[in-house]
Image: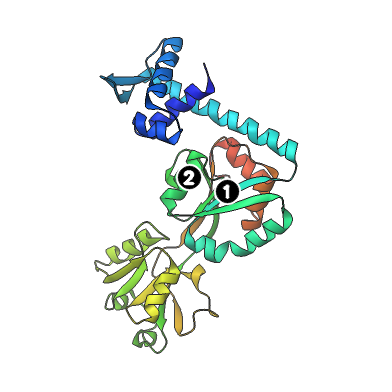
């Protein structure tokens, strides 16, 4: 039995049983993977995949057990590399942080600045994406830490920890008539064209639910992936914006007014995600503490060992 054989069967499962996709991902050939899978099955004495001709069509019951164990073995092999590299190289290495635009643009700059100052020998990489992309990057080991509001807690392979709660606000051009309608109501908002996040981003589900509860359909004229785009189009007079209050920057947002909407929409929770069973290095803990001081090393370790959230806001 070889680790590479285990990588093959795990990647085949990740690629929806598509051996060609698995071969491309692992930079090898489809016949080579098929041969190694058969050798592994012969050694173990069980079939891992169901077949129709040369195609894999499903996972057998023994295969489900084998794949679960294989994933754990590969994770521990990676942990061995991470642990030994930490002791061998000291305070140097590579940390990949994945975050949504709102977090990367508004919540993380000072954290990144301070982390780089503390760990000049650590190569910090930041990937931006949708909450689903971020979750999948962390699950696959392509990112060490994920930060988002949506989706992360829907992946059982991840440990998620709450970082902070935040609310939405409505941004409007200066002197807009809606500024006279205080307190702001959902019925009043529904009278105007709205510009807000794409359905998978930054608490959009809570915006939808708020209008559903009062039986009103919002006039969403435009959606975007980040708050800066939304603010740009609000400034052009194309509608009123609903964005995260985290994204309000009075110095940069000249000509716009932010109206508190915490009474209209449910609060949201930013979460930090880590892959279950992953060995965390010293500088992983340091970045987490900079971003969320309440998530001490002890709290994070308890969550990783206990298999669930060890801290609630």
Q: What residue did someone put label 1 on?
A: 96
Identify the residue under disc 2.
Answer: 137
Q: Residue at 36% of width from left, 59% of height from top?
A: 205
Q: Quick check: 31 left or right of 294?
A: left
Q: Quadrant of residue 180?
A: bottom left
Q: Quadrant of the C terminus?
A: bottom right
Residues under numbered marks 1 and 2 in contact, where contact means CB atoms less than 8 Å apart? yes
**Point 49% across, 28% down: residue:** 71
Q: Secondary structure at mark 1?
A: strand
Depicted 228 relative to depicted 307: above or below: below
Way the structure is coloured: rainbow
Residue 290 position, x and y percent, is: 66, 56
Front one among 43 and 24:
24
Question: What residue is shown at x 43% (from left), y 21% (from top)?
Answer: 65
Q: Earlier in the sequence, mark 1 or mark 2?
A: 1
Does the rendering let one see residue 271? no
Residue 150 location (% of width, % of height): 43, 54
17 relative position to 307: left or right: left
Q: Residue furthest bottom?
A: 175
Is label 2 in a helix, a strand or a loop? helix
Image mark for residue 74: none
**Closer to the camera, 117 or 272?**
117
- In the picture, measured across the screen, residue 128 lies left or right of residue 220, that is right
Across and down, in percent, residue 104 comes to: 53, 61
Q: Quadrant of residue 176?
A: bottom left
Q: Is residue 299 above or below residue 101?
A: above
10 Å crowding of disc 1: few (<14), some (14-19), many (20+): some
* Cα gap from disc 1 to disc 2, whole angstroms: 10 Å
At label 2, counting other C-alpha atoms closer than 10 Å, the crowd grade (few under 14, some 14-19, many 20 or more) is many
């Amino acid at each position: 039995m070889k680790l590479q054989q285990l990588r093959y069967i795990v990647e085949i499962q990740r690629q929806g049983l598509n051996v060609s996709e698995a071969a491309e991902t692992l930079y090898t050939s489809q016949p080579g993977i098929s041969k190694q899978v058969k050798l592994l099955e012969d050694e173990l004495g069980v079939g891992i995949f169901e077949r129709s001709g040369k195609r894999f069509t499903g996972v057998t019951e023994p295969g489900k057990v084998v794949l679960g164990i294989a994933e754990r073995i590969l994770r521990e092999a990676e942990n061995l590399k991470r642990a030994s590299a930490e002791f061998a190289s000291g305070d140097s290495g590579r940390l990949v942080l994945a975050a949504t635009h709102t977090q990367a643009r508004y919540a993380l700059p000072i954290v990144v600045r301070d982390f780089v100052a503390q760990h000049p020998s650590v190569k910090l990489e930041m990937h931006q994406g949708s909450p689903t992309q971020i979750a999948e990057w962390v699950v696959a080991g392509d990112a060490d830490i994920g930060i988002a509001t949506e989706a992360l807690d829907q992946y059982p392979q991840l440990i998620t920890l709450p970082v902070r709660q935040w609310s939405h606000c409505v941004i409007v051009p200066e002197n807009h008539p809606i500024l006279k309608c205080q307190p702001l109501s959902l019925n009043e908002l529904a009278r105007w064209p709205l510009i807000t996040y794409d359905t998978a981003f930054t608490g959009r589900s809570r915006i939808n639910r708020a209008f559903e509860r009062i039986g009103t359909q919002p006039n969403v004229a435009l959606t975007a992936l980040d708050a800066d785009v939304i603010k740009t189009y609000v400034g052009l007079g194309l509608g009123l914006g609903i964005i995260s209050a985290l994204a309000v920057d009075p110095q940069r947002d000249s000509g716009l007014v932010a109206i508190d909407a915490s009474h209209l929409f449910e609060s949201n929770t930013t979460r930090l995600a880590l892959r279950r069973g992953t060995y965390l290095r010293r500088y992983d803990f340091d970045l987490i503490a900079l971003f969320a001081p309440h998530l001490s090393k002890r709290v994070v370790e308890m969550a990783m060992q206990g298999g669930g959230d060890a801290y609630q806001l």
